[in-house]
Image (cartoon, rainbow, N blue to C red):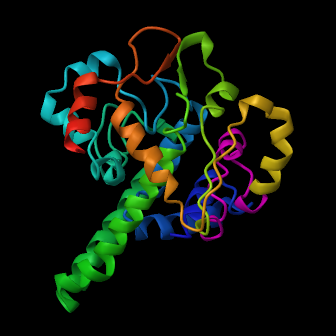
Amino acid sequence: MSCVWFLISSGHGSFSDNPKLNSIVGHLLHSWILVPYHGWRISHRTHHQNHGHVENDESWVPLPEKMYKNLDNSTRIFRFTVPFPIFAYPMYLKPRKKGSHFNPNSDLFPTSERKAVLTSTLCWCMMVALLVCVSFVVGLPQVLKLYGVPYLVFVMWLDFVTYLHHHGYEKKLPWYRGKEWSYLRGGLTTVDRDYGWFNNIHHDIGTHVIHHLFPQIPHYHLIEATKAARPVLGKYYREPKKSGPIPIHLLKNLTRSIKQDHYVSDTGDVVYYQTDPHLYQFFHDKSK
């Protein structure tokens, strides 16, 4: 899991000054975890360019009220019940409203980058083929044990971390539309987290605010950059709660957010997550 920052850094071009090296490292690491490198890199770039925008953001975007209310009850319950929210990443890569991360003709990608997306999709296919071949040699149970289980743990942790960088703060986080949105305001809707012992393992991935405002900063400078930015950001910086060795306290943030953060209003240029009282009551009764 310590490779998370190397994955992200290669996509932002902050792993190396050499674009070819970024691409090679990016393809090797992303293909290994069944992610098409350029497909993810481009959509993640869109996420950073539009962070905190209800319509234009690309990751962990809130459901508009009308769309939410068109869901049937079973879909609502499934969507907001653990473990679904922390196993969402593989589904995020597949076809959605703007298309698939694997399809070079998807609306996610500009025409000039479609060949790069195709290259990454081919690398992904090679990784899948490798896993199939290995399963014939050592058996499917061994592949599931040695690759499948660690993969699921990785996906769970990745979704847990990224979700809490955009949700679950003690106070509701704003989302913007229209003239109320700006790059700075959107970046300040993200949240830093303290992961205890995992801070070092993750190369300080919890310093998410500065990463969003200045994605070109390499991971080994994010701590000092955050310290320098705190006095400038003042009250707009949300200080993370100190963690023990293991960040058990974040489970409370996760469960509270899933129970309460269901949709945002279809109107208004500054909106906040709203709670479906029926779904909230369902979770409340279930927890008794």
Name, please, the residue furthest toward the bottom: 138
**58 shown above or below 151:** above
**229 shown above or below 11:** above
**190 shown above or below 21:** above
Give whichever of 20, 173 is nearer the camera. 173
**Residue 236: percent from the left, percent from the top?**
72, 30
Going by the image, does 54 lie left or right of 194? left
To which quarter of the image does residue 45 belong?
Answer: top right
**Residue 265: percent from the left, percent from the top?**
39, 14
Give whichever of 242, 149 is nearer the camera. 242
Q: Which residues are magenta?
A: 199-221
**58 shown above or below 206:** above
**Residue 183: percent from the left, percent from the top?**
66, 27
Residue at the image point whose x is 81% and y is 40% from the top: 230
Reply yes or no: does residue 115 show up in magenta: no
Reply yes or no: does residue 218 show up in magenta: yes
**Residue 19: percent from the left, percent from the top?**
66, 59
